[in-house]
Image: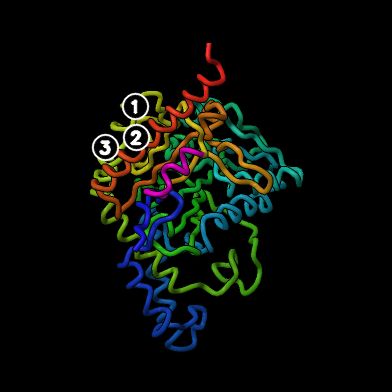
Amino acid sequence: MLQRPIYLDNNATTPMDERVLAAMIPYFTEHFGNPASINHFYGWEAEAAVKKARETLASAINATPEEIIFTSGATESDNLAIKGVAEAYFSKGRHLISVVSEHNAILDPLHYLENLGFELTLLPVQSDGLIDINLLEKAIRPDTILVSVMAANNEIGVLQPIAEIGKLCRDRNIFFHTDAAQALGKIPLNVEDMNIDLMSLTAHKIYGPKGIGALYIRRRNPRVKLAPQLHGGGHERGMRSGTLYTPQIVGFGEAVKLALKEMKSETKRLTNLRQQLWEKLATLGEIYLNGHPTKHLAGNLNISVAGVDGQALLLGLQPLMAVSSGSACTSTKIEPSHVLTALGRSDALAYASIRFGIGRFNTSDEIDQVVEHTISTIQSLRKVQQSKSFASNPS
């Protein structure tokens, strides 16, 4: 039987935890009611399950259950937050601020609004991936209505100074949105302490099901109004119509509960595995860390490798492991990651980059295998590259 590769792409998605699946299964078959059907038992038990999950999510970020709106995932939550604020407050201002290294689920809605007449400022990042708070402060204008900065970067794992950004926005009466898809269950999140007004969340990054997410929307001090992007039955306080997917919501709640319970021990374990991987790879030389050396997700390691072809590197690693590269496929061509080029990486280093996403089910033995194979692959590719260089320049 063919051995499956070691899975190290946990920043892209995670395998579902069996404990999450066990919690979900009864709501596919036995407890199948519609939570909006409040006139009979089947609806009541589904509604109770949704309520419990909503309370779990709210407690995880120090919100109230009424401030949690369920969506299909973080992308929908991002779109609802950004377009919803823009439409609801366009008479107050049409200036939006974000960061060049954001996920496309943020950048694309912002550019869409820009085409409709809104003005957009995209802040640069420093070489370590962090934004400069002073630049953000200078970018704020009287007509700025929203700042959107992700809590943890999906490619390089950098943790932005969310609390500082939130305070700056609150002091200037500007709404602050953060995409916390990568951060939920991995770092402490507190919407009150961090002055967050809108927060996008998803389940599949924390060993929950795909296709379910949530948006936190502040209800007081200040109250955030959103223009709904889906109209229909008026579900979710009129902000997101559509029958709630009870099994997915139950799974989301269970995934959050488990992540919070294990956060401290898992952070320590993943930090050790990441360090084990980085220290051994770094001995090769000309291996560059992408992102901040300490302000990052515990399980994320993104590196650029000098002296190798990026596509050959990825192909060389693939038999043993599943990882992400530093390039992104578009409809017409392969391009270097916009996050890595924002750090100042050359196209060559951006292409020759690997993101290792270490997760709950990875072991120290697996990391040892990954180290051995990665080092061997890089050494072989560098020899090939050196031979090509010598052949083209024999003098």
Nearer-N-terminus badge (1/3): 3
Q: CA distance from mark 1 to mark 3?
A: 14 Å
Residue beneath label 3, please? Answer: 276
Compared with 364, 395 (above or below) is: above
Badge 2 is on which residue? 375
Amino acid type, label 3: Gln
Number of numbered tags placed on the structure image: 3
Residue bearing the label numbered 1: 284
Q: Which residues are magenta?
A: 312-322
Look at the numbered discs 2 and 1 and tell me whether their residues touch, using CB distance below 8 Å: yes
Q: Amino acid at mark 2?
A: Ile
Q: Amino acid at mark 1?
A: Leu
Asked whether disc 3 touches disc 2, contact meaning CB atoms under 8 Å apart, the reply is no
The image shows residue 371, relative to residue 32, as above or below, that is above
The residue positioned 45% from the left and 74% from the top of the image is 246
Residue depicted at x 49% and y 87%: 39
